[in-house]
Amino acid sequence: MPMKTNVTGNRNPELEMRSDSAARNANGLRVSVLGFAVVWLVVFAAGCGKGSEPRAAAPNLPTAAVRVQNVESKKYRATEEVVGTVRAKLRATLEAKVSGRIEKMPVVAGQSVKAGDVIAQLDVGEIRAKLDQASAMREQAARELQRFENLLRDKAVTPQEFDGVQARWRVADAGVTEAQTMLGYATVTAPFDGVITRKLADVGDLASPGRPLVDLEDPAALRLEADVPEAIIGGVQSGAPLPVRVAGAASVLDGVVSEVAPVADPNSRTFRVKLDLPAAAGLRVGQFGRVAVPVGETTLPRVPESAVVQRGQMEMVFVVVGQNAQLRLVKTGRRIGGEVELLSGVSAGDPVVVEGAAGLVDGQPVTSQ
């Protein structure tokens, strides 16, 4: 026969003690968590509250002398930086207009030249020969023209015959002018004052139309060229000043928009914008720069950077309520000219400690200056 088990009669004291201990530990843990949450809420409400009621002075704390300043709401023009390159406003790539071997090239990269200085001299014997031929034909046409003038006075020739001779003289004279012009192209000169930035040929090379000889730039007038995205091109207007930062310049430059491309690049969806730059020490062609393009305007409270106290991962300020310093946790934004934006924690007009805040304690009595 199956045996019956008496559940109530065979109790295990050790198991009952373990169950009671586990229950007490669970209850204690819930009480601890609940108590910690209550304490944290109280502390957070005390630190972040914006109540205007003064708090009781913290016991055994001396009165601190501080300087107080009201929080001010100031406008800030939000911008987006666009990268660009410093380039010369006046630059050119010089080429020969006729073919010929380079005889002389008295320039080097980095050399300063004046307008009219010789950049390259070409050997163009063929053109000299054509000039001699054209000159001889013009002399012959001039003698024939003089003879026909005498015959025309004697009515030995008709006016039509004289007109033909006169036309041949004009053609010969134009041939001389053309040959002289082509011979002048054998000397390549600088079109303006500038600096040779690249030398692409040398003595002995064959110069021809379409082959660059040197790059010439005028470093006296510089500008920044940047490709502005179409999403913010509305903030760029011709003639408007925009701040430009270049690594070689000691300070922010005041660039002026001189040119805005009327159409966008279909590949990059950007507009080429050119800004004239003022003369500044350390500014050179090819440098990397940034232009701040306005995208909007915001108004936020600002305080001096000395008013914000950093403790661990928290940022805070002290607001004077009555005669006590009240701690406020804040969230900071941009740093602008020695001031910092406060995104939350204070309002415009709140008296904030701007000097001596680092040594204060919440509730400490203060005297403001």
Image (spheres, rainbow, N blue to C red):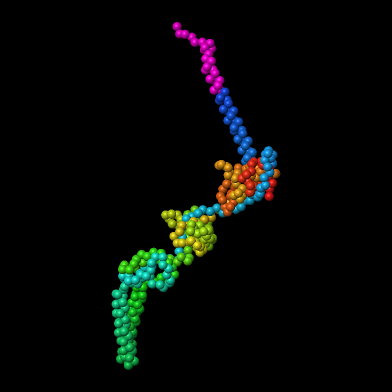
Judge whether residue 173 can be spotted in this image: yes
Asked if residue 15 lies in the magenta stretch, the reply is yes
In the image, residue 59 sits, relative to residue 77, either above or below, namely above
Q: What residue do we see at 68% from left, 39% from top?
A: 60
Expressed as whole percent of the image width and height from the top left, the position of residue 362 reads 64, 41
In the image, residue 288 sits, relative to residue 57, either above or below, namely below
The front one of 234 and 358 is: 358
Asked if residue 9 lies in the magenta stretch, the reply is yes
Q: State which region is magenta.
A: 1-23
The front one of 94 and 137 is: 94
The front one of 232 and 74 is: 74
Q: How many marks?
A: 0
Expressed as whole percent of the image width and height from the top left, the position of residue 80 reads 51, 53
Q: What residue do we see at 45% from left, 59% from top?
A: 287
Q: Residue furthest bottom?
A: 154
In the image, residue 255 sits, relative to residue 323, either above or below, namely below
